[in-house]
Image: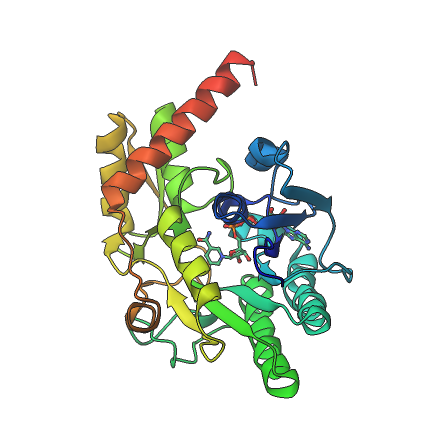
Amino acid sequence: MKPGQRKKVLVTGGAGFLGSHLCERLLAAGDYVLCVDNFYTGSKANIARFLGNPHFELLRHDVVSPLFVEVDEIYNLACPASPIHYQFDPVQTTKSSVIGAINMLDLAKRTDARIFQASTSEVYGDPDIHPQGEDYWGRVNPVGIRSCYDEGKRCAETLFFDYRRQYNLKIKVARIFNTYGPRMLPNDGRVVSNFVVQALKGDPITIYGSGNQSRSFCYVDDLINAAVKFMESGDELTGPVNLGNPAEISILDLAQRIIELTGSKSPLVFKPLPSDDPTQRCPDIDLARRELGWEPQTTLEQGLVRTIAYFDELMGRARVSGL
Ligand SMILES: NC(=O)c1ccc[n+]([C@@H]2O[C@H](COP(=O)([O-])OP(=O)(O)OC[C@H]3O[C@@H](n4cnc5c(N)ncnc54)[C@H](O)[C@@H]3O)[C@@H](O)[C@H]2O)c1
């Protein structure tokens, strides 16, 4: 890249929740962004605000097919991320993770681009150690209903490290823990969006199991900061690196917090826990703190207030247009 030239950055899954925030951040930093998405769970609404920007380009494309473009950096985010969506067409989910990874790694190899992989805490499965550090190998069911996602992401990690060992690629593998914020889909079954939408509608809030299972939630702006810092770090830092917020909260406490912040009168209803649902999920982020000088800055309350405002506006618009 010549001095003063804009970096050309490819974001696969760029019309999704995390992808659209990443595109926004990269455009603000002065990069040229090529957003690639098959719109399986992403939407034009997420990226509509960038369409007039001369440094933004949108390509409808499925990463299961090879892609031939010239880029300096690749963020590979293309994969449905919520159980409802990744279990709808599990074979396509595995293909998006595994064949998608091969295609993007081949592109990185051809163009000598750095490549970031959006891996997941789900590679740890239902963990028997807590919190999970990067050296923990996980406890994953290879034949369950979540395996298309968990094993697909595990295989993608394997591919990233084999491309590194075999072809010396500049890889950045991030294990992302639960992240939430504006532009999540209202109906994708993820716990924060579920609870917020139910609370705003005054519908019963559905708790699976006893509600004592814990999760930790990272606000989207913090996660995007970490991803960009990781991409900018030295070539020797390949990961895997856990990215998430280590502040733990039980599902029951989360529901109560959202009820308070929305002023909702929603009752709680309890339903059986789906199979392979982990009981605890909390990142050990010492590596990210040490190597990236990063840690989350947004409190759960601040993040929930922004997320609630987003869904409130979205649902208001839907009411006005009679949807
Ligand atoms: N949000 C989280 O809490 C979280 C946690 C761990 C990992 N991740 C990972 O981060 C990435 C983004 O997640 P998200 O929360 O933004 O989900 P999302 O569903 O909003 O975004 C995924 C995007 O990828 C697109 N996509 C899916 N399959 C594709 C394909 N084959 N070709 C091209 N595009 C495709 C979708 O249309 C969507 O725009 C995913 O890879 C996910 O596994 C997210």
Asked if residue 22 lies left or right of residue 179, the reply is right
**Residue placed at 31% from the left, 56% from the top?**
215
User: In which quadrant of the rendered image does the C terminus lie?
Assistant: top right
269 up-or-down from 217: above or below: above
x, y percent for residue 299: 24, 47
Nearest the eye: 151 or 234: 234
Nearest the eye: 112 or 242: 112
Looking at the image, the residue that sits furthest to the front is: 3
User: In which quadrant of the rendered image does the N terminus lie?
Assistant: bottom right
**Residue placed at 29% from the left, 52% from the top?**
210
Asked if residue 56 lies left or right of residue 300, the reply is right
x, y percent for residue 235: 49, 76
83 up-or-down from 262: above or below: below
Q: Where on the picture, by quarter, is residue 144?
A: bottom right
x, y percent for residue 141: 51, 72
Q: How is the image coloured?
A: rainbow
Is residue 273 in view? no
> Total of numbered circles in the picture?
0
Q: Where on the picture, by quarter, is residue 96?
A: bottom right
Looking at the image, the residue that sits furthest to the bottom is: 166
x, y percent for residue 29: 48, 48
**Residue placed at 60% from the left, 71% from the top?**
156
136 up-or-down from 102: above or below: below
Is residue 188 in view? yes
Asked if residue 39 lies left or right of residue 283, the reply is right
Nearest the eye: 241 or 203: 241
125 up-or-down from 167: above or below: above
